[in-house]
Structures are given as structure tokens and as C-alpha cells.
């Protein structure tokens, strides 16, 4: 029985096209724009913002062109034909035996994320033209925002882990600058530092993982593929080759996942994400929808073979990725219920949705998880920008739903409609986009045998519908309150109100024409991006509409690695359905490996073979029923609590001790910040730092100061005894001796010729006498 399709059965190599060959330009353009904005931005008519917008538009055109050509490439391939990624690499620099390259790796996954990042970044740049108009650091903002997007694009496009790490760290640096954009507010500075150091904690795992993978895989990748051990494609093939030591690849996978936990805000390193709302709302939208927080999920998806083998995905039990994802879904959704800040509600929603992506990847639902990256970007960006629209035009830059919002659906109809569409997509209601991605994750988790985790996913769906209904009711329904009722809320103590209440916003010139008439709809620069995103929140799910048959599953064709036909099949031991094949050239004891994507010429595996759950309307109806139940209960409770002021509900947490303790536990965010700041930092890190400081001051500095004092004393002795007495003494005595000789000989220099002649004659006589005697 044949294992791979023969060369005669495979069509000629597929044509790539100019956009695919030059995809490296996609991140290069915004990086160049960043440099130009920094150098010349303040001299330009729009203070550099035009360069940011144009660069992202250019990257979007390039990404769209690459996407179009990739679709042509996959559509023209047969089912048996392997669709090679377009990889171009150049040597960057060499040191010893290390060859650090720079290049592009274009396949379905990278094309998908490139388009999403470029598209969302473009809309956010346009939105920021109005939202940040008049800001005192307007040029700096657009420079950092442009570099932020460039870093994400470079990371997505990277063909090796060194370039991947570079893009990863550029995003971390830019997020620090953007979150702390209004650094004069101490809370903003602290939030930026918290995000920076929390993410850096996870990044240590990335360095460890990359190092372990390089030294473990380099020999194999050089021998079989002729590429460095930093190559993403090489690492993926090595992981599925049967060669890796199980302990090594497990430790490497765990180390890499620690970095993903930090970057994507997963439990227990999720605490920085809500505080990142200190940045301007466009930053929150970009950071939480399609860039930095998605980077961790993208890393798992990109190096999926490493995690698949190292963490035993589709094994007999739950793995680390599934467990962390499931915990994150529930704990973050619970925290969203006790938030009054609309951006914090959305922040915890982002954390929860990232948990769904991790849950899907951990359960073998690779395509649904990746597709959720795509759909989530549109509706979450729309929700964040909608929150910014409300604060900008209706609540005097306050984000407090309970105090400064309410009844806004009448005065902000466009913002309201786009918000509702995106909320329905987030909740997973048919036919909105979230239904086709999030429900697919839940369905595939159950199909692969992880029933308990599927139940957690359904509980998360219930909670999502409930807290988003609460947020929608407080914002758009009921009676207007505070700023939305025309009251001035600039003196508010609300943190986010102060974030966006910078000096320029106090000027009517920075608002649209309706700015002097109380709450009103935002201008076109804000509402047009909202409308575009809401359309995509409604329609993007149809790119992988599994309910309508295989002809609608375009993402499966375009994004999922195309597997060569594998005939010899057995099943893995876990509850999932993975195919086992024999990889040629592997050691006999490691001959079996889970593989689905392989080149027919070499038989080298590049991606695990995964099965998809067949769509069933019964499961979909159950999921939507749970969503509607959560929304209905939340609506009733919101009506009774916030409008009717029902005495049975008002003050309930104060009357019932258990509820009060639970509410306090949630308000304090499970006391994780206390654990990190009071216990770990002050009780553990602070004493260690104090001990290190004492050691530095008393031991190291003591040694250095002792050496300095000894050197000073030695130099003094040398000066007094060697320099002054010996060296200077020798010089001075030589002069004295010469002077004495000159003084003694002075009488002979009388100036009388007769005397000179007598002396000369006497000397000659003495010399002659001596010669005679001798």
C-alpha cells in the first residue's frame, strides 16, 4: 500500500506570483514609515499621521495581493497535491557556527493573519486621526502605532525564530510606549510598566524554548532540509520526524507556552491586559483584537507540531494548553460581571476569547481556533472602537457605564447598531461570524472526546452573553446618567476618564460639529470604520460556513495545510482522530509519527493530520439556546436592578454574606495582583533585592573601595619615596653635581691668554712625564 502520492501523480510546481514573492515588503513599509515619522513627522502638514495611514494602506494592498495569489495557488492544486509555502531567506549575519537569516514564510496561516493585522491597523490609524486630534504627542503616537503594526507583521511573516523573536519584542516595546502614552498620569505609567514586566516574565520562556529547539533540531534540519535549527519549517518537520527526545520537546513546548501565556493574557499572567486600557482607545482596539494578544495564539498555531508532540495533543487526557485555556475562559468572564468600565468589560472578554482559541488548539481544533482569530479581530475591534466613540462624543471621555452612560441608542444610532452586531457575533449567534468559529471550537472539543472541556466552553458562552447584555443595557438603554445626560464629568475620578481627557480635548476644535450639543453621534472618521467592521462581523463567518457543506468551507482549503493522500492509516491512542504514518529515514524505534502534511518527494512531515467534527444543527441549537438564556436572564436582572431598582436585588451583596464575599473576591480580581505585588514582589523579590543591595554595598563595593583606598595609599608612598626621593632625587643630585663641578672649574676660566698657555704647558709637561715614567 502506498504511503505518499508519486511524483507522476503530482502536478508541476504551483506559480507563486509577484505579491507572494515580495511579501517581505508588508512589514518593511511601516518600519520605514516609522523612521520617517520620527525624523520628519512634525514638519509635515498632518504631523506624520499621513505617513502612518499611507504605510498601512500600502501594507494592506500588498497583503491582499498576497492573499489573492495564495487563494489562486490553493484553488489550482488537486487534492493530492502538496501546496508548498513560499519561503525566501537571506543570510543576515554569521557568528561562529551560527547563521542568522532573515526571510519570509508565506502560507495560509500567515496570509490570513497578515490581512487581518493590516486591515485592522489601517482602520485604527484612520480612526485615530479624529480621536487623537490635537494630542500633545500626536506624532509620537502615530510613530509608535505604525512600528507596533510593523512588528506584528514581521513576526507573522518570519521564516525563523530569531526574526520571530525580533518582531515579538518590538511589539512589547511599542505596547509599553502606547499604553503609557499619557504618562503624566501615574496610573498610566504603572499600567505600562506592569504590562511590560509581566510580558517580559513570559518572554523568558520564549528564549529558553528557542534555544532548546535550536540545539536539539539543528543537526537534523541541516541534514534533511539544509536549513538552520532556527527555521520554523525545519523545527516543525523535526518535531514530527520521530527524532525528538520526549523530555526535551516537552520542556521546550512548556517554555514556549509560558511565553504565550504572558503575551496572550492567559491565566495566571492575564492581569496586565485589563490595566492596558490606560492607553488611548485605538491602542486598546488594535492590541486586543488582532496584534499583541493574538501573538501567543499565533505562536502555538505556527509551531503546532512542537506542541502537538511535546504536550501530547489528542492524547488520552487534557493537556496544559487546554487546561489553561479552559480556566481562562471562566475566570475572565466572571470578572467582566463586576466591571463598570466598558473598556475593562471588553478587555476581560478578550481574555476569555483568547482562552477559547487556546482551548481549541489544545484539543486539536486547529482550524476553528485559527478561524476564531480571524472573526474575533473584526467584532472585537468594532466593540473597542465603539466604546471609544461613546467616550469621545457622549460621555466626556468617561468609560463608566453606570455613572456616565445610558439611553445612548437614540443619540448614537450608528454606534448602537454596530455595537449590537458585534455583540451578537461575540456571543456566537447565527448567522454572525462568531457562530462559525467559536461554536466550531466547542463542537470539535466535544467531538475529540473532551466532554468536560466542551461543557466549560458552553458555560463560557452563557457568561459571555450575560455580561455583554449587561454592558449593552447599561450603555444604550435605561435613562441617561451623568455625562450622557448632559452633566459635566471631567472632574471624575474614573481612571479612563482621565486617560482620554487630555488638554486638546477641552477645545471644541478637536470635536466634530456636534460637539457643543451634548451627546451626539461621532463623525465619519469614527463611524465609517465602525460600519466596515460591523459588516465583517456579520459576514466573515461565511468563509468557513460548515453548516452549508464543504463547498462553503473555504478556510479549510485556503488555510489548513494541504495533506498528501495517506493510505496506510491507524488511529492514535487518544480520544481524538489523528492519523499515524511512517516517516522514511527515522530511527526504527521512532518510526511512527503523527503526520498529515508532507512533501511527496521526501516524505517529511510538516503538520499533524487532524479531523473535523461533522456539523450538527442539534448542537448548534443547544449552544444558541444557552446564549439566549444567558442574555435573557441578564436583561431581566439588569432591568430590575438598574431601572426598576428592585429592593430584592439592590444591596443584595451587602445583605447576603456569601454573595458579598464572592463579589469582593471578584472585585479584587482573585487577589492575584496582591499575590504578585505584595507576596511575590515585596515578600520574596524585595528581600532578595534588599539582600543583593546589601551584598553590593557592603561586599562588592567594600572590595572595590578597599582596593581604591589601598591603591591610593600605595600611590602616595610611591610618590613620596620613589618619585620624590629616588627619581626626582637622582635628577636633582645630577644637577647639583654638575653645578659643583662647574663651580670648581670656574677659576680656570679667567679670560687671560697667558694663564691659559701656562696651564696648557703644565698639562703637557705632566703628560710627558707620565709617558716617560711608564
Image: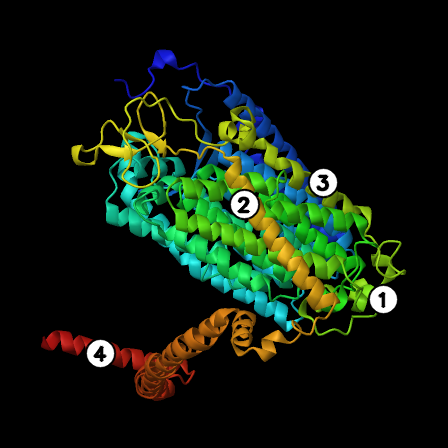
N-term-proximal mark, 1 vs 2: 1
Q: Distance between the residues labelled 3 and 2?
A: 28 Å
- Mark carried by residue 486: 1
Mark 1 to mark 4: distance in Å?
Answer: 130 Å
Residue at horizontal 60 percent and vertical 67 percent from the top:
338
Indicate which disc, 2 or 4, sits on the residue closer to the N terminus: 2
Q: Please tell me how crowded label 4 is: few (under 14), some (14-19), or many (20+) other residues with Cα within 10 Å.
A: few
State whether residue 469 appears in this view: yes
Query: Looking at the figure, which quarter contains the N terminus?
Result: top left
**Mark 2 residue element:** helix
Label 2 near label 3: C-beta < 8 Å? Answer: no
Label 1 vs 4, first from the N-terminus: 1
Q: Quick check: 407 left or right of 461?
A: right
Q: Residue drawn 55% across and 76% down?
A: 660
Q: Nearer the viewer, mark 2 or mark 4?
A: 2
Earlier-in-chain disc, 1 versus 3: 1
Q: Position of residue 529 (x, y in %)?
A: 73, 44
Is residue 346 visible to us here?
no
Q: Which mark is residue 765?
A: 4
Q: Viewer-proximal residue, 390 or 181?
A: 390
Secondary structure beneath dot 3 equals helix
> Could you say whether the residue bearing mark 4 is in a helix, strand or loop?
helix
Q: Is mark 1 on a helix, strand or loop?
A: loop
Task: Please identify, in this view, whether the residue under mark 1 or under mark 4 is nearer the observer.
Answer: 1
Residue 565 is situated, as x and y percent measured from the top left of the image, at 36, 21
Quadrant of the image containing the C terminus = bottom left
3 or 2: tag closer to the N-terminus = 3
- The residue singled out by tag 2 in the image is 623
Amino acid at each position: 500500500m502506498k504511503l505518499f502520492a508519486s511524483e507522476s501523480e503530482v502536478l508541476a510546481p504551483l506559480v507563486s506570483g509577484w505579491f507572494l514573492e515580495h511579501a517581505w515588503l508588508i512589514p518593511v513599509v511601516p518600519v520605514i514609515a516609522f523612521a520617517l515619522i520620527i525624523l520628519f513627522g512634525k514638519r509635515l502638514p498632518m504631523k506624520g499621521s499621513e505617513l502612518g495611514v499611507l504605510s498601512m494602506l500600502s501594507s494592506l494592498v500588498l497583503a491582499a495581493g498576497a492573499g489573492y495569489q495564495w487563494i489562486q495557488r490553493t484553488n489550482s492544486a488537486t487534492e493530492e497535491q502538496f501546496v508548498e509555502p513560499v519561503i525566501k531567506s537571506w543570510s543576515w549575519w554569521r557568528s561562529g557556527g551560527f547563521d542568522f537569516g532573515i526571510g519570509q514564510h508565506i502560507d495560509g496561516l500567515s496570509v490570513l493573519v497578515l490581512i487581518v493585522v493590516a486591515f485592522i491597523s489601517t482602520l485604527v490609524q484612520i480612526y485615530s486621526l479624529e480621536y487623537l486630534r490635537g494630542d500633545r504627542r500626536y506624532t509620537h503616537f502615530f510613530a509608535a502605532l505604525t512600528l507596533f503594526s510593523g512588528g506584528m507583521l514581521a513576526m507573522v511573516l518570519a521564516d525563523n525564530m530569531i526574526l520571530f523573536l525580533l518582531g515579538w519584542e518590538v511589539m512589547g516595546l511599542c505596547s509599553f510606549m502606547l499604553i503609557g502614552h499619557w504618562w503624566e498620569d501615574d496610573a498610566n505609567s504603572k499600567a505600562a510598566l506592569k504590562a511590560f514586566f509581566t510580558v517580559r516574565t513570559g518572554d523568558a520562556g520564549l528564549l529558553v524554548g528557542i534555544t532548546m529547539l535550536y540545539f536539539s533540531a539543528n543537526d537534523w534540519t541541516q541534514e534533511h532540509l539544509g536549513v538552520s535549527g532556527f527555521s520554523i519549517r525545519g523545527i516543525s518537520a523535526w518535531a514530527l520526524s520521530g527524532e525528538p527526545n520526549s523530555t526535551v520537546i516537552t520542556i521546550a513546548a512548556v517554555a514556549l507556552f509560558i511565553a504565550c501565556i504572558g503575551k496572550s493574557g492567559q491565566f495566571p499572567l492575564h492581569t496586565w491586559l485589563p490595566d492596558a486600557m490606560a492607553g488611548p482607545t485605538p491602542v486598546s482596539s488594535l492590541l486586543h483584537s488582532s496584534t499583541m494578544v493574538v501573538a501567543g495564539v499565533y505562536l502555538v498555531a505556527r509551531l503546532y507540531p512542537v506542541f502537538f508532540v511535546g504536550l501530547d495533543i489528542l492524547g488520552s487526557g487534557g493537556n496544559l494548553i487546554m487546561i489553561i485555556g479552559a480556566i481562562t475562559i471562566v475566570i475572565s468572564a466572571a470578572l467582566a460581571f463586576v466591571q463598570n468600565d466598558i473598556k475593562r468589560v471588553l478587555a476581560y472578554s478578550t481574555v476569555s476569547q483568547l482562552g477559547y482559541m487556546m482551548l481549541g488548539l489544545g484539543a486539536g481544533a486547529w482550524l476553528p481556533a485559527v478561524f476564531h482569530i480571524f472573526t474575533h479581530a473584526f467584532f472585537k475591534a468594532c466593540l473597542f472602537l465603539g466604546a471609544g466613540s461613546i467616550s469621545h462624543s457622549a460621555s466626556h471621555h468617561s468609560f463608566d457605564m453606570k455613572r456616565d452612560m445610558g439611553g445612548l441608542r437614540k443619540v448614537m444610532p450608528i454606534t448602537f447598531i454596530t455595537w449590537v452586531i458585534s455583540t451578537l457575533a461575540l456571543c456566537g449567534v447565527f448567522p454572525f461570524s462568531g457562530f462559525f468559529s467559536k461554536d466550531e471550537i466547542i463542537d470539535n472539543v466535544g467531538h475529540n472526546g473532551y466532554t468536560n472541556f466542551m461543557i466549560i466552553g458552553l458555560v463560557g458562552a452563557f457568561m459571555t452573553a450575560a455580561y455583554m447584555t449587561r454592558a449593552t443595557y447599561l450603555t444604550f438603554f435605561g435613562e441617561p446618567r451623568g455625562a450622557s445626560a448632559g452633566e459635566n464629568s471631567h472632574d471624575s475620578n474614573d481612571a479612563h476618564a482621565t486617560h482620554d481627557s487630555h488638554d486638546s480635548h477641552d477645545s471644541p476644535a478637536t470635536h466634530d460639529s456636534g460637539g457643543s450639543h451634548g451627546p451626539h453621534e461621532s463623525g465619519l472618521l469614527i463611524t465609517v470604520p465602525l460600519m466596515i467592521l460591523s459588516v465583517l462581523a456579520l459576514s466573515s463567518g461565511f468563509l468557513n460556513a460548515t453548516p452549508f457543506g464543504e463547498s462553503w468551507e473555504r478556510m479549510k482549503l485556503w488555510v489548513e495545510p494541504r495533506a498528501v493522500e495517506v493510505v496506510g492509516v491507524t488511529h492514535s491512542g487518544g480520544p481524538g482522530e489523528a492519523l499515524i504514518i511512517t516517516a522514511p529515514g527515522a530511527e526504527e524505534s521512532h518510526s511512527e509519527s503523527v503526520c498529515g502534511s508532507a512533501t511527496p518527494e521526501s516524505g517529511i512531515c510538516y503538520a499533524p493530520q487532524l479531523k473535523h467534527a461533522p456539523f450538527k444543527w442539534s448542537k448548534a441549537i443547544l449552544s444558541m439556546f444557552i446564549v439566549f438564556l444567558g442574555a435573557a436572564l441578564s436583561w431581566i436582572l439588569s432591568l430590575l436592578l438598574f431601572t426598576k431598582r428592585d429592593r430584592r436585588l439592590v444591596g443584595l451583596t451587602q445583605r447576603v454574606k456569601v454573595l458579598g464575599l464572592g463579589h469582593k473576591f471578584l472585585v479584587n480580581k482573585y487577589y492575584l495582583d496582591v499575590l504578585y505585588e505584595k507576596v511575590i514582589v515585596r515578600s520574596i523579590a524585595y528581600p532578595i533585592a534588599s539582600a543583593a543591595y546589601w551584598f553590593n554595598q557592603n561586599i562588592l563595593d567594600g572590595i572595590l573601595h578597599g582596593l581604591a583606598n589601598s591603591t591610593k595609599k600605595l600611590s602616595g608612598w610611591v610618590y613620596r619615596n620613589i618619585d620624590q626621593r629616588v627619581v626626582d632625587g637622582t635628577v636633582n643630585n645630577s644637577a647639583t653635581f654638575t653645578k659643583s663641578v662647574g663651580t670648581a672649574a670656574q677659576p680656570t676660566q679667567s679670560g687671560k691668554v697667558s694663564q691659559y698657555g701656562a696651564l696648557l704647558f703644565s698639562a703637557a709637561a705632566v703628560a710627558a712625564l707620565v709617558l716617560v715614567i711608564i
